[in-house]
Each structure stands twice: as C-alpha cells, then as structure tokens.
Image (cartoon, grey):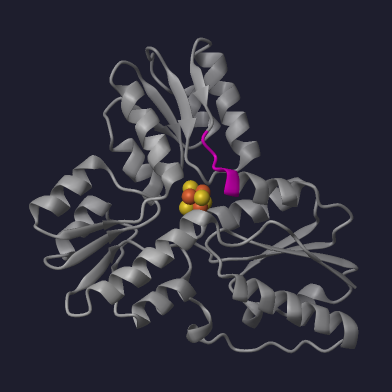
Amino acid sequence: MEIISVIPRGYCAGVVRAIRIAHETAEKYPDTPVTMLGMIVHNRYVVEACSALGIRFVEDPMKSRLELLDEITEGVVIFTAHGVSDAVRRKAEDKGLIVVDATCNDVLKTHELVRNHASHGDVIYIGRHHHPESEGTVSLSSRVHLVTCIEEAEQLPPLEHVLITCQTTLSLTDTAKIIDVCKRRYPDAVIAEEICAATRVRQEAVMRLENTDLLIVVGDKRSNNSGQLRAIGLSAGIPRALLIDSEEDLREEDIAGCERIAVTSGSSTPNVLTAGVITALKHYAETGELITKKIRITQIL
Ligand code: SF4
C-alpha cells in the first residue's frame, strides 16, 4: 500500500493570520469579553482550541452575521476571515464594541471589486447560500445577485454592465460551468474569477493525482473547501473519496485492499490532524495494524 501525501494542503495564509489575531486578541484583553462573530474557521478542533483561550463564539446557521451581532453586547468582537458586510461593521461600531478584523486579504480584494463595480453596474456573484463569505459580499449592494448553480444563472433577470465574480473557496470546475452560462447570457460581461490561490493550488494538486484508489480529505463536514476537494477528487476519476475529521475516523474497512491512498486537507484543517492520518496509514501499510490516537486540544494551535 502506497500513501501519497498531497502537496500543497492544509492551512492557508488567511487562516493562519486569523488564528494569530484570535490568539493576540485573547492575550491583549484578558479582562474583557472577547467574542468571535461566527466560527473562526469551519473546524471544530480549532474552535475548541480558541474557546480554551477564553474566546466565546456566536454561531447559528439560520442567522445572518447582522442578526448574530445582537448576541454581543460588550467587549471585543472579532470578524472571521470570511469577511462581513458594511452594515455589520457599522452596527458593531454603533454598539460601542471594540472591533478586531481578521478578514482575509483575498476576501477584502473581492469586496473592493464588487463595491466599485456595483456603483455603476450589476454584479453576478457565484457563491453558496448561507455561507458567511457570500453573505458578507452580497450584502455590499442591492446590485449584487447571488447565483449558486447553473439553473439560477439561467433565471437571472436582464442586467446592465455586468461583472461576473465569485466566492474565494469554490470548485474550479463547477464555477467554470456557471461562468460559461453567465457569459452566454451576458456576452459583454467582465469576468473576474476570484477563487483564491490557496484554494486553486490545493484543488489542482488533487486533479493531478493518478492511479489512486482512495482520496482521504481531512476536514470538517462544514468546511466548504474541504468538501470541494472531495468532490473534485471524485470528478477527476478517483473511485472513492472520504471526508474525515481526524485519524479517529479512520476505519479498516475503508482502507483495506487499497493500493494507493492519497491524503489532503482543506485550508481550515490544522496540519497536526492531517499528519496524524498519514502516520496512521503508513503504519497500517507497514504492519497491517490500524492504530489511531485521540487528538488533544493542546496540539491544535
Ligand atoms: S481560503 Fe483563500 S480566501 Fe479563504 S482565508 Fe484562505 S487564503 Fe483567504
């Protein structure tokens, strides 16, 4: 059995920065409530490790960030790497909260592009429903139209001076298909595909895999970019692809009989989790014995 460690994988620069900011903020305000607006990243281990630093999280998938802000009445609010709308920024300031912004620079770049274009034209924004990044971007202007699939692109109304752009963590292949439909419907549209470099290179590394029986993606079920890596592996022809939280989820029945297993992880996955999966698989390949260890929160940050 051969174990392929896919490179690049794991934490991106935006997530590393957000975790550093969370750490520094908890240290800087030891006697003030510090609350994160949403999950720092979609990974429960990282959230648990930040909670251990004293950071509180407000999160409800059914509520917007603007609504969640009602649950923070004092102290420091940290905006996550996914970014927030201008309305959220204003409301946080009006409430007298100390604002710490961990929005990723790639997301801020898309916000600037969308804000500038929406002043004189319509923006088609390809993204996901109920995702914090798309929520923040779509809320920048009433001229931004969220499109999540080909069917929605076909149903868009007549638009003027169109810009087509997208969420930073989408699938390269799915996004290209939706852009094609938008281009056909609005032939003069300007295209600014904004999938970030970190997402792109992780997906391209999976697309290049050959002769692989099984792809294991280490990441949280709620992580958009981890889910995309799994989907891309399957559409690239890998017969089976699993999304697991950590080595604790490895099952012998899933790996027995495989000749080549590739392991990657989303940009919100701590490297220690992926390393644990690779070590357990290599040990299984050498000895036929699957030994997994329980993850300790102190290993995460
Ligand atoms: S996935 Fe891309 S956009 Fe998101 S935090 Fe990482 S670098 Fe930034």
Residue 247: % across, % down: 66, 79
Among the 4 quarters of the image, the one containing residue 17 = bottom left
Left or right, residue 182 beside residue 228: left
What residue is rendered at 60% in x and 43% in y? 171
Q: Position of residue 120 (x, y in %)?
A: 30, 16
Q: Is residue 181 magenta?
A: no
Magenta extent: 194-198
Q: Is residue 6 left or right of residue 168?
A: right
* Residue at figure coordinates x 35%, y 32% from the top left: 112
- Could you tell me residue 263's position as x and y percent? 73, 65
Query: Which quadrant: the N terminus?
Result: bottom right
| Location of residue 280 by image quarter | bottom right
Give above or below for 116 relative to 72. Answer: above
Question: In the picture provided, is 33 more to the left or to the right than 112?
Answer: left
Tell me if residue 59 can be seen.
Answer: yes
- The vertical placement of 22 against 104, above or below, is below
Residue 129 in view of the camera: no
Task: Look at the magenta stretch and give its main secondary structure.
Answer: loop
Residue for point 37% across, 12% down: 160
Residue under the point 65% across and 59% down: 9
Where 103 falls versus 25 (above or below)? above
Taking the view exactly as shown, the residue that stands out farthest to the top is 188
Q: Report the number of discs.
A: 0
Q: Is residue 116 above or below residue 172?
A: above
Identify which residue, 157 or 109, lies in the foreground.
Answer: 109
**x and y percentages locating residue 222 in the rendered image:** 49, 61
